[in-house]
Amino acid sequence: MTDRGLCHILADAMAALAEGRFDEITPQVMAEVERHLNECPDCAARLGTAAPGAGDLLHVEARAPSAAEWALVWQRIDGAAQQEAHQRRRHRLGHGMRPWMGLSAAAALLATAGLWQWHESAGRARWDLRFAGPGEAAIESLEVFGDATAFVLSAGDDGAASIIWVMENGET
Amino acid sequence: MPDDDVHEMELRLLQHARDGDREARRALFERYREVAFRVAVRVVGHHDDALDVVQDSFIKAFDALASFQGDAAFKTWLMRIVNNRALDQIRSRRVRLAVSLDQGTDEARPASLPDHGEDRPLEQMDRRESAERIQMAMSRLPPAQQAVMALYVGGELTYGQIAEIVGVPVGTVMSRIFHARRQLHEMLPDLAGHDRSGSES
């Protein structure tokens, strides 16, 4: 429970502390003030807004970084942010699709048994995969997202099965 | 500019930064890098280490911007990250020092030194020596006191903001400053004479 009497008794000490006059306080009074502030939200809130700053003892300034040093620090921060954004983009594109990538590899293997044939169909270019056996697979769409390329591979009669294949540009 | 306008401008910057706007992030970096450095260098003591702390802290802050609720000021939130990162830095340095003591280490090299190019050589030497002694004395304080003192001296923060950053009550912040100052005065009796009041109780 807050002892309101202490607010008045310790008022001078708290005023000194609010102004950074620590030298005027004894260890015993400091202990009393600390105890009181932990119990009295009003005094804690009042003192909490004070910003006296330190005395001269600690005001020998450290050497400030040069413009070149700041530029280098910023480059690294910005580089890390760009890398993070790139990872997130890859994650969005790739995560959850990874199981399909195994299937796409299988499709690629099947494709080696088939025949690539380029032709124009209904006025738009498309890659077709023709297999020795029944059925057909074709790349339905190809889209570039930043550093990644996404393929949609459809297979089966009337494109009954689709495989999404995401590949980072530069991957071999 | 009125405080409300500054606050509103910062909120806009934060919103843009959260959306990944590089210019907004750069503006936040330029606004708070100096204060972050002043706090970091008081804790870690070395110029280059303090720059590393600032760099890591901004990377972490920008990465976590989505989780920043705005219930604290951005500066307070950032200083908490700086403070924690700086304390991690000195903890890991103590481990490295313990490991490399037998191998002739330079870990105990002098702290970041002031470089007031316009001063005469003797004054410059005095400043360098004072800064080095103060930093050495700061590094001998218990980490909890050191962190609070770094924020008190370099952070331009209220007692309440320091309390929020460190996660202790305001009374504890003041008590730590009180005891840290007494220890610094004992370690640096000649420099203590230059303190504001100059009369230690």
Image: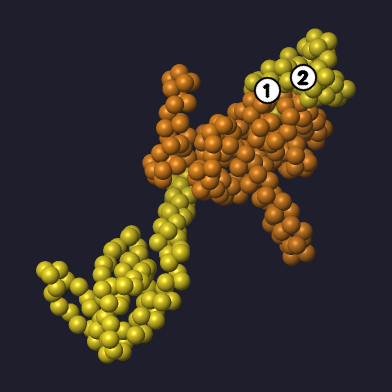
Q: Tell me, what hue is chain A?
A: yellow
Residue that label 1 marks? A48
Q: Position of residue B64 (x, y in %)?
A: 53, 46
Q: Residue at x 73, y 20 (%)?
A: A41
Using a 10 Å C-alpha cutoff, classify the residue at mark 2 as few (fewer than 14 neighbours), some (14 to 19) or many (20 or more). Answer: some
Using a 10 Å C-alpha cutoff, classify the residue at mark 1 as few (fewer than 14 neighbours), some (14 to 19) or many (20 or more). Answer: many
Query: Is there any visible trace of residue B28 in the rendered image?
Result: yes
Determine the secondary structure under disc 1.
helix
Camera-nearest residue between A5 and B95: A5
Q: Position of residue A110 (x, y in %)?
A: 34, 85
Q: Please determine whether, in this image, residue B167 is positioned above or below residue A50.
A: below
Q: Tell me, what hue is chain B?
A: orange
Camera-nearest residue between A149 and A11: A149
**Picture quadrant where residue B184 is located:** top right
Disc 2 to disc 1, how far (Cα)?
12 Å
Kind of residue sitting beneath label 1? Gly
The extreme right residue here reads: A28
Residue that label 2 marks? A40
Left or right: B34, with B131 as reference point: left
Kind of residue sitting beneath label 2? Cys
